[in-house]
Image (spheres, rainbow, N blue to C red):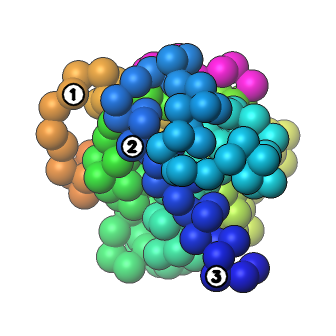
Amino acid sequence: MSQKIENNYLKFIECFTQLIEEKSYDEISIQDITNRTEMSRVNFYNYFSDKEDLMWKTFQYHFLTMNEKVEKIDPVTLLSDGKPLTYYWFEIIRKNRIFFYSLFIGGMPYSLEIKILDYLQKESYRTHEVLRMKYKNKSIPYIRINQYLTGALVHLTRELLRENDEWDSEEIATFFTKLSVPGIIGMMDV
């Protein structure tokens, strides 16, 4: 990707993130986005199929910032760089609170919500490779654990955003891990 193309793409992402801090998703038009970026509608459609696609790619942009730090969990400690995996999730949410509030509380389209849940579940599944290999319950596939944990994570995220309090990402992540890990370990082939 050329530097100009990448810069334009990032400009759309950054301007959309700014707009979502000022207005609800439903109130933002393509015209608002192109005005903010000082680019044409044609430029917009060179990068995104519609506003929902821009919201999805903005989510991915923020998520991938976190994901770059997390490849796999340590098989012994079940931590990544000394922290629970969910620490990185809660930290990126905390740092981009208004965007994620708009996403999870402000009424994102249902199709986007499903896409995000599926994406998070797949990422959880990917990072749980060591746990999947030790899992011994053949009647219930490990993917069900990931679906359960993803739903719990998203619900906890919504509640934290709705309450609008500050939180300590490591404390919340440790709490979440202490609730989930004993059950998963109990199903492992040790």
As drawn, 67 above or below 109:
below
- Is 110 magenta? The answer is yes
Amino acid of disc 3: Gln
Question: Farthest right residue?
Answer: 139
The label on residue 164 is 1
Q: In terms of secondary structure, where does tag 1 sit?
A: loop
50 or 72: nearer the viewer: 50
Q: Nearer the viewer, mark 1 or mark 3?
A: 3
The label on residue 18 is 2
The label on residue 174 is none
Q: Residue at horizontal 56%, vertical 63%?
A: 10
Give the CA distance from mark 1 to mark 2.
Answer: 19 Å
Q: Which residue is mark 3?
A: 3
**In this picture, which residue range is highlighted in magenta?**
104-111
Q: Residue 56, how many percent across, how many down?
A: 65, 43
As drawn, 11 above or below 163:
below
26 or 165: nearer the viewer: 26
